Amino acid sequence: EMLRRKLHNQILELKGNIRVFCRTRPLSEEETNLEGCQNVPTISYTSKGEKIGKGLQLHLTTNKQSKKRSSNGESHYNFDFDRAFQEKASQEEIFEEISQLVQSALDGYKVCIFAYGQTGSGKTHTMIGNPSCPGMIPRSLEQIFTSAEKMKDQGWKYSISVSMLEIYNEEYKDLLGKKLPAGKQHTVKHDQQGKTSVSYMTDVKVTSMEKVNTLLNKAMSVRSVAATQCNEHSSRSHFVFRLNIEGSNDTLGQTVNGVLNLVDLAGSERLSKSQATGDRLKETQNINKSLSALGDVILSINNGDSHIPYRNSKLTWLLQPCLGNQSKALMFVNIAPSQEAAQETLCSLRFASKVNACEIGTAKRYVS
């Protein structure tokens, strides 16, 4: 078992501590009709050489000022990631690629998997999915429960608990509990052992997928969602699913403490395109501000800055232990393959490239 853990960790370290997977959602019927009028698809994929399954090209026809514009009036941008999933990729295929990372949380590591992209690009489908096509969150829990059961034969016992919160307009909101007491607010603290606590946040012990699904359905029913010009069912908050894992083995005299953060970020959107007003305007401004703060943190880590601006947003402060060194992180960049969304897709892919170049150091296992 100890050899398996060591080899498993070495595999992940060879792949890089912050990895990026790109996932393209299928075209809608309306988008398919529009794309059929073009000479080339908006998104194409590398079909030869070592970059198969990793490289893609964005074809942009709306950027008239681009220096990369070709003779036929199009601009071409090449990107390479750890994996590039095409439109037909299934939830099963994608989870197969992250299952090793999920296992790391059971082994005592801090793990963060988050979905980034413009509104309507398929982030919530990737992370949560639906009963007939479950996403990364329910699949991760199913693997955790299955693995924990198997580990009983080796003397391991696990206690697993979940909390679910959203960050809405730069405020934490408990999606499983009651309203806060008068005059109180949720605050996040990180101790020297790397443990994170959120005041007044409901933490529920779980032993089965049935319990998790009940809690997840409850959380989704109260998450902030609204219609915008860009997306009829736009998530207006960042959703954070936190799984705390405590394991002990009396025979070995060991305990492990792992954390799995699964995050469905609110979608970025341009105010000029969303035409947001009133509450939607405030939501969009706060969403874009926090996503910008996430970019600043990634850039600071990449530059090796002595000060990392984690406190600039509630999102980055909450995820500090998983974005900093001694942790493992993976980002899904979700993109829409339509020409109408190409400018936003370009912004998402450029941000993802910066994340992919980021090294956060060797992950630390929390064991005693």
Image (cartoon, rainbow, N blue to C red):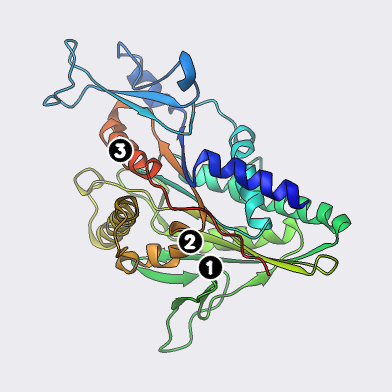
> Disc 3 residue type?
Arg
In this view of the protein, can residue 258 be seen by the observer?
yes
> Disc 2 residue type?
Arg
The span from disc 3 to disc 1 (Cα, nearest Å) is 32 Å
Residue pointed to by mark 1: 175
Q: How many marks?
A: 3
In this view of the protein, can residue 213 be seen by the observer?
no
N-terminal-most mark, 3 or 2: 2
Q: Look at 31% across and 13% down and name the residue there.
A: 37
| Image: 180 above or below 343 | below
Name the residue nearer the viewer: 163 or 125: 163
Name the residue nearer the viewer: 215 or 117: 117
Do the residues under discs 2 and 1 have CB atoms within 8 angstroms? Answer: yes
The quadrant the C terminus occupies is bottom right
| Image: 339 above or below 159 | above
> Local crowd at mark 1 within 10 Å, few (<14), some, or many (≥20)?
many
What SS does tag 2 mark? loop
The span from disc 3 to disc 2 (Cα, nearest Å) is 29 Å
Q: Look at 46% across and 77% down and name the residue there.
A: 189
Residue pointed to by mark 3: 350
The span from disc 2 to disc 1 (Cα, nearest Å) is 7 Å
Horizontally, residue 242 falls left or right of residue 64, namely right
User: Residue 34 at x, y = what percent?
Assistant: 33, 20
Place residue 75 in its image quadrant: top left
N-terminal-most mark, 2 or 1: 1
Residue pointed to by mark 2: 223
